[in-house]
Image: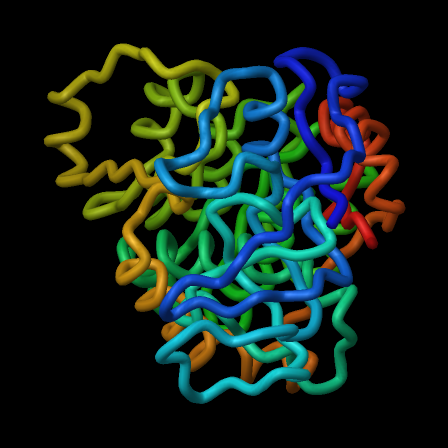
Amino acid sequence: MHAITISEPGGPDSLVWAEVPDPVPAEGEVLIEVAAAGVNRADVLQRQGFYEPPAGASPYPGLECAGRIAALGAGVTGWQVGDEVCALLAGGGYAELVAVPAGQLLPVPRGHDAVTAAALPEVACTVWSNVFMIAHLRPGETLLVHGGGSGIGTMAVQLAKAVGARVAVTAGSVEKLEYCRELGADVLVNYREQDFVKEVRAATGGAGADVILDIVGAAYLAQNVKALAVNGRIAVIGLQGGAKGELNLGALLAKRGAITATSLRGRPPGEKAAIVAAVREHVWPLVEADRVRPIVDRTLPVQQAGEAHRVMESSAHVGKLLLTT
């Protein structure tokens, strides 16, 4: 098969479409003939040499894909060759074939094709596990989403609105904020021009956000605590603003707040399977009812993965970037 390989850590030009050995599905795995793969910030970090794949994972980038099952490993039940699926991966999505544990498969949602479905697994699993399974966002509460125009952000806005929450978003342009409004966001904050702490507290009558989904990390740590409501929860899922920050524990104690920090890629297959099962139960009906939809900015041939990474690094996109084989 062919896959996008990383010739050496570096810029987008280090992504090379090359012939590599075909993967063989192990016991409990299926082999997917890839139609499309989603592009994620983690792929950029891997290309730069900052994010090694977990032990035993494919060395090629790509944390989600969609396509058709080409073969079944021993012991796999509930799936058949020819089924159209999308999958959460530990790596290997930028390829013609990828092997994945069967517990990380989802059927392509009714009404969607096997290209668009590639935009769903990573964002749906990340948002559902952090905002709902860990932070327990409830109807009537306020969710603050940093990076509202991202793939994660656009999914978080839609899911929170679908369960009856109020949503505030930060983004760096009028265009991205307007798109978030169209998806249902109630409070729009341009972080380049406005103080999100003041804006969120003003919009909530001084209460603050009950849950904050944060892709920034250290640079927003102190402000997030200030923006947090009493009994609020901060879910850190990214470190775009750094990994080390100073935390005023007294301020967090006064809020009776909690901070969690999780990643998805390195979790054991059993934990991933539990998240995928929850997404299939709770999110897939919303997708099939068109209450939640994949937001795709653009689709490029997989051989142009470098260009997709340039777009990702520029933050000029809204929603997901996809690569087709």
Where does residue 194 sit, x and y in percent of width and height?
62, 24
- Residue 291 visible somewhere in the drawing: no
Q: Give the camera-side residue of 161 and 130.
A: 130
5 or 190, nearer to the observer: 5
Q: How many marks?
A: 0
Q: How is the image coloured?
A: rainbow
* Quarter placement of the C terminus: bottom right
Examine the rendered structure and indicate whether residue 285 appears above or below residue 48.
below
Towards the viewer: 274 or 19 = 19
Q: Residue at x 39, y 76 (%)?
A: 74
Q: Is residue 208 left or right of residue 125?
A: left
What residue appears at the point 88 percent right and 45 percent down from the top-left corner? 300
Left or right relative to 171: residue 272 = left
Residue at x 75% of width, y 71% of height: 114
For residue 237, say whether it is visible: yes
Q: Where's residue 118, x and y in %? A: 68, 60
Farthest front residue in view: 21
Could you tell whether 248 is left or right of 272 in the image?
Answer: left
At 54% from the left and 16% from the top, the residue drawn is 49
Q: Is residue 307 above or below residue 49?
A: below
The image position of residue 90, as x and y in percent, is 47, 47
Q: Quadrant of residue 309?
A: top right
> Where residue 155 appears, x then y in whole percent?
59, 57
Q: Quadrant of residue 242?
A: top left
Q: Quadrant of residue 101?
A: bottom left
Residue 5, compared with residue 301, is above or below; it is above
